[in-house]
Amino acid sequence: MTTTVDAEPVVESSGIIPVYDPSTEEQIAEVVDSDRKAVDAAVARARATFESGVWRKLPAAHRADVLFRAANIIRDRTDELAAIEARDNGMNPVAARHIIKVSLEMLVYYAGWVGKIHGESSNLVSDGLLGEFENYHTFTQLEPVGVVGLIIPWNGPFFIAMLKVAPALAAGCSAVLKPAEETPLTALKLEEIFREAGLPDGVLNVVTGYGETTGAALAAHPDVDKIAFTGSTEVGRLIVKAAAGNLKRLTLELGGKSPLIMFDDANLDKAIMGAGMGLLAGSGQNCSCTSRIYVQRGIYEQVVDGLAAFAKMLPMGGSDDPNSVLGPLISEKQRKRVEGIVNEGVASGAQVITGGKAMDRRGYFYEATIVTGTTPDMRLIREEIFGPVGSVIPFDDEDEVIAAANDTEYGLAGSIWTENLGRAHRVVNELRAGQVWVNSALAADPSMPICGHKQSGWGGERGKKGLEAYFNTKSVYIGH
C-alpha cells in the first residue's frame, strides 16, 4: 500500500517523488519534491530561530536535556525506525537496528558535549605602538556558525543524518536537512522526534527533493552559513562551486577507494574474514569499504580462494529477511553502473573469480564479486564502485605496496593486516588516508574523527573535531 509522507510545515512543491524498497522494487511512500521556494522558506525559518536565539541562547543544560530526550525517544522507537530504515534502504532488519543503535550513540555522545566546549584565556604582554609594553587579558570564544545546510546520501541515511544533526544542534546552530531522494523517510521521522523532545519549531527543518534541484538550491543559498555534505567527490566539487557565492564554511565527506594490505605474516583466518567484511559491509555501499585488496604474493592464491568462499557463503536478502547479510543496491541505475564497471574490466583482461552479475530475482541485487588480473588504469581500481566488488592484487614488498595503495585521488581509509608491530607503524605512517585500521576493518566510534585526505573531503566529522566544525572562533583582547 502506498502512503504519503509530507515534511511539516507544508511546502511549495514542483511534484512528488516516489520512494521504493530496493529489495522488492515496490513503492512504499511518496514525498514532496521541494522547489526553490520551499528551500527559501526552510532557510528563512532556520534563520529566524538562529537570530532570535530561541535555541542557541538557551542554557547549555536545557539544550542538552532536549538532545537526551530525543535519544530516549529514539531508544523507545527503535523497532519502528529500524523497520522504516530497512524498507527505505533495502537493508536487512539486523543491519537496520544496528544503524539506529549507532545513531543513538552518536546523539548521546554529542549531547554530552553541550556546555563542555570552551575557549582559552591568557594574560599577554606585548610591545605597544609607542614602544611601551601593553598588558591584555585575552580569550577566545566559540560561537555557533549560524544556519547550516546538511545534505546526506542514501547509505545508512538515519546514521549520516545524525552524524550532522547532532553536532549542529549541540553547537547551537539552526539547520536545514536534505536527505537523499531515494531514502527520505527516517529524516522526516527525525524532525518529528526532535520536535517531540522539545526542540523549538524551525530549528531543524527537513526538505525532501532531488539533489540537482533541492540540494543545489540549499548549497547555493546566500543565507546559509555552512554546508555539511556526505556523498561523491563529483558532487562535492559542485558544492564547492555553489558555496563560493557567500564563501560558506564546508565540511565534505566524499568518496573513497580504500586499500587493504595483507602481509604474509597476518593471521589469515581473521584477515580473510576482515577483508571480506571490509569489502562487503552494506553490499559495498560504504565510502570506507576496502575494495582494493593487496595481498603479499606468498599467500595470494590462498587469500583469493578464501575471499571467494567467503563471498559465496554470505546469504542475500532484503528488508524482510532477518537472516540475510548482503542486501540490494539502492537502485537499478546503481546496479547497472556496477555491472558496467565489472564488464569493462573483464573486457580488458580482468578475471571474475566469483560473482560478477546481477541476480535473477526481485530487487536490485548484485552478486558479491571477487576480481583478479586488474591493472592500475582500470575503473575497477580507479573509481569508487559503491557495490559488492573487490579486486585482489599481489605484491612483493612493503615499498611497492605503499606506492600502489597511495596511487589514488582518494584518501579516506585503509586497513593493514600484519603481526609485525613495527611494520604496522611504518605503513600507518606512510598511508595517505584519514583513518587506518590495523588488524581490523570499518571500526568506528563517536569519539574518533574521520577526516578525508586528498579528494576524499575537507574537514572532519565525529569526535570533538566534528563538533568544532559548527563553531566560529572569536579572539578578544581586553586592555588594562
Image: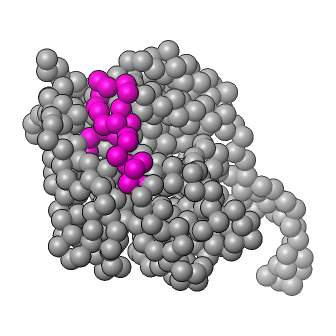
Q: Residue at x 27, y 63 (%)?
A: 352
Front residue (pair 378, 48): 378
**Total number of numbered discs in the rendering:** 0
Q: Is residue 243 toward the left or the right of residue 19 in the image?
A: right
The magenta stretch is: 307-331
In the image, residue 453 sits, relative to residue 284, either above or below, namely below
Q: Residue at x 52, y 20 (%)?
A: 75
Q: Residue at x 59, y 68 (%)?
A: 263
Front residue (pair 273, 205): 273
Q: How is the image coloured?
A: one colour
Q: Is residue 205 visible?
A: no
Magenta span: predominant SS is: loop
Where does the image place residue 388, in percent across and percent down from the top left? Answer: 33, 52
In the image, residue 422 sits, relative to residue 277, either above or below, namely below
- Where, quadrant-wise, is the C terminus in this rendering? bottom right
Q: Is residue 3 toward the left or the right of residue 323 in the image?
A: left
- Quick check: is 328 in the magenta stretch? yes
Where does the image place residue 249, in percent across and percent down from the top left? Answer: 46, 59
- Where, quadrant-wise, is the N terminus in this rendering? top left
- Quick check: is 265 in the magenta stretch? no
Q: Is residue 139 visible?
A: yes
Where does the image place residue 42, in percent across and percent down from the top left? Answer: 31, 38
| Quadrant of res 238 | bottom left
Q: Residue at x 89, y 80 (%)?
A: 132
| Quadrant of res 393 | bottom left
Front residue (pair 258, 250): 258
